[in-house]
């Protein structure tokens, strides 16, 4: 096998992983008390900007009853744009300041007759400064734009959803909704989404082999109870999908909040995803999305496109995947799990727009599959909302940039849910899910201890004080982080208490 062929195959594999590693960060949030979709209760009107703190599901319910003028929407959009520019400038200045401090500390190392204690002190200082620099860089280059993209999407939802909802009701009334692509949900399992799924089995096996050879496949989780639980949920969704090949499920002992699928029915779920999901419906929504990628043969299509490696590949032999502070590079697994903060590689892969189409397709099919399996289909939106609102802009998830706009994605998901035949009951939470979460606790604790001593591609000075943590709280509005002159009502209330 030629070296050139190996490089080409490796590049193609990385592109597929970049595109199909789809779900990841989210902080825990209380599970909904009921899966029922009920009309929103009347609420006291708030300033327009305060509604941007609410979840997508809440805004879908509230927006038809809100009445703001076009001038108010325009003024709020201008405010968001100005705040974003001001905020990014603020954090870019912080990055420059840390760079200067690092440079000055490195000059100190060149002084003669430095004592061991003083050298250690400087090493710790540089190490922590680099950590802080990376955090500020993530916010400036990735986090802040993602956060404001999310706020603008919610503003667009409040403004446009009433008309979109009216159109949905009309399509339901005249039956036009049945003519949408893949609208034949009563025939799930008997229809053909993309013929030739069986032809992808060898491709998926080869990809797994390549991942292991390159050292970018995390180890599998050894807990039989957790593995069997995840397999049971995945198989339940798969049995109610258009999958035409056996599903092989692997649970990986990785802290990244992630799941991805490879061609031919190979599904990988990271431990971090299990930690972050709050109920079984959310997990089923993620798994349904990944199974949809297999059914639509997206991985196969991406690999075909990836043969023109120069169009997809940036930075020579390195591909960056920004997933909750993790980096996947053509290196060792430990770089994926532990090396990100120091390396600070902020690369952005553009796949010629194919991700936009594929993700919207996988969203639609995944919602259908979780619904067909009896799960509350809003689990998908709830999980996405947590990613975008509570975590995405903190860790600078590069994934958001190459995927469909938030508003389009959420509206398409809500539209599909509205078009699905209603069921009297949906599965949201199960005792098996709660038991799985308990089983995870000792594994998480053990991993935290072990991670302190595992190798990394980043030099690590032992015995240093921990660097300051990023100044962010789950659910905090980005305007508040950026020091907006007019805090939200929620922030003002918190300040008083």
Image (cartoon, grey):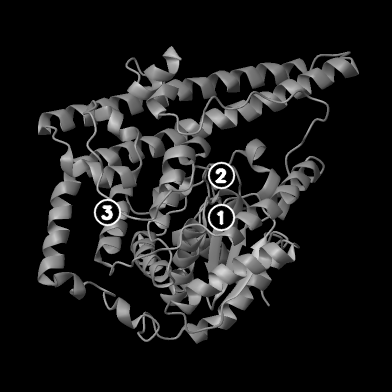
Near-viewer residue (138 or 230): 230
SS for callout 3: helix
Cα–Cα span, label 1 and label 2: 9 Å
Q: Are marks 1 and 2 in contact (CB under 8 Å)?
A: yes
334 in relation to 363, above or below:
above
Residue 404 in sight from this viewpoint: yes
SS for callout 2: loop
Residue 403: image location, x then y, percent: 38, 54
Q: Is residue 251 left or right of residue 146?
A: right
Q: Is residue 53 left or right of residue 79?
A: right
Residue 234: image location, x then y, percent: 54, 70
Name the residue carrying label 2.
Answer: 324
Name the residue carrying label 3.
Answer: 411
27 in relation to 132, above or below:
below
Q: Which mark is residue 258?
A: 1
Q: Which mark is residue 84?
A: none
171 in relation to 446, above or below:
below
Residue 483 in sight from this viewpoint: no
Cα–Cα span, label 2 and label 3: 25 Å
Of the residues under marks 1 and 3, which one precedes in the sequence? 1
The residue shown at (53%, 38%) is 395
Residue 174: image location, x then y, percent: 10, 70
Of the residues under marks 2 and 3, which one precedes in the sequence? 2
**Mark 2 or mark 3: which is in front?**
3
- Toward which corner of the image does residue 49 lie, by quadrant? top left
- Toward which corner of the image does residue 251 lie, by quadrant? bottom right
Residue 178: image location, x then y, percent: 20, 74
SS for callout 1: loop
The residue shown at (30%, 28%) is 50
The residue shown at (23%, 29%) is 44
**Mark 1 or mark 3: which is in front?**
3
Cα–Cα span, label 1 and label 3: 23 Å
């Amino acid at each position: 096998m030629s070296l050139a062929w190996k490089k080409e195959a490796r590049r193609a594999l990385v592109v597929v992983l970049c595109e199909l590693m789809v779900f990841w960060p989210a902080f825990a949030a209380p599970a909904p008390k009921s899966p029922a979709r009920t009309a929103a209760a009347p609420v006291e009107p708030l300033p327009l900007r305060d509604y941007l703190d609410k979840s997508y599901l809440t805004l879908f319910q509230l927006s038809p009853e809100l009445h703001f003028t076009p001038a108010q929407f325009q003024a709020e959009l201008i405010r968001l744009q100005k705040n974003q520019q001001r905020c990014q400038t603020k954090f870019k200045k912080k990055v420059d300041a840390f760079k200067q401090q690092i440079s000055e500390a490195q000059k100190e190392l060149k002084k003669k007759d430095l004592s061991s204690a003083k050298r250690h002190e400087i090493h710790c200082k540089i190490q922590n400064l680099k950590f802080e620099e990376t955090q500020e860089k993530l916010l400036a280059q990735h986090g802040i734009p993602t956060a404001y993209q999310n706020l603008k999407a919610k503003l667009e939802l409040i403004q446009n959803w009433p008309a979109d909802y009216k159109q949905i009701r009309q399509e339901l009334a005249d039956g036009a909704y049945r003519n949408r692509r893949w609208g034949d949900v009563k025939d799930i399992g008997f229809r053909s989404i993309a013929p030739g799924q069986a032809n992808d089995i060898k491709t998926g096996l080869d990809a797994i082999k390549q991942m292991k050879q390159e050292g970018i496949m995390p180890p599998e989780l050894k807990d039989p109870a957790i593995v069997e639980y995840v397999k049971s949920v995945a198989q339940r969704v798969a049995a109610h999908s258009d999958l035409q090949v056996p599903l092989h499920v692997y649970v990986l002992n990785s802290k990244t909040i992630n799941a991805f699928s490879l061609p031919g029915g190979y599904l990988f779920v990271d431990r971090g995803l299990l930690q972050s999901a709050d109920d079984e419906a959310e997990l089923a929504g993620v798994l349904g999305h990944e199974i949809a990628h297999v059914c639509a043969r997206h991985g196969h299509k991406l690999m075909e496109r990836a043969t023109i490696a120069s169009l997809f590949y940036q930075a020579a032999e390195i591909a960056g995947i920004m997933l909750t502070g993790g980096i996947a590079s053509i290196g060792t697994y430990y770089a994926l799990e532990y090396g990100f903060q120091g390396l600070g590689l902020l690369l952005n892969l553009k796949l010629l727009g194919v991700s936009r189409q594929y993700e919207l397709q996988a969203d639609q099919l995944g919602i259908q599959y979780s619904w067909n399996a009896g799960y509350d289909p809003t689990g998908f939106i709830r999980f996405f909302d947590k990613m975008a609102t509570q975590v995405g802009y903190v860790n600078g998830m590069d994934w958001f940039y190459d995927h469909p706009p938030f508003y389009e994605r959420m509206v398409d998901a809500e539209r599909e849910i509205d078009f699905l035949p209603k069921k009297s009951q949906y599965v949201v939470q199960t005792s098996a899910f709660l038991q799985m979460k308990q089983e995870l606790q000792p594994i998480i604790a053990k991993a935290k201890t072990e991670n302190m001593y595992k190798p990394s591609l980043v030099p690590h000075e032992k015995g240093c004080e921990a660097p300051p943590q990023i100044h962010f709280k789950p659910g905090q509005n980005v305007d508040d982080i950026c020091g907006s002159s007019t805090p939200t009502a929620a922030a003002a209330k918190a300040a008083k208490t």
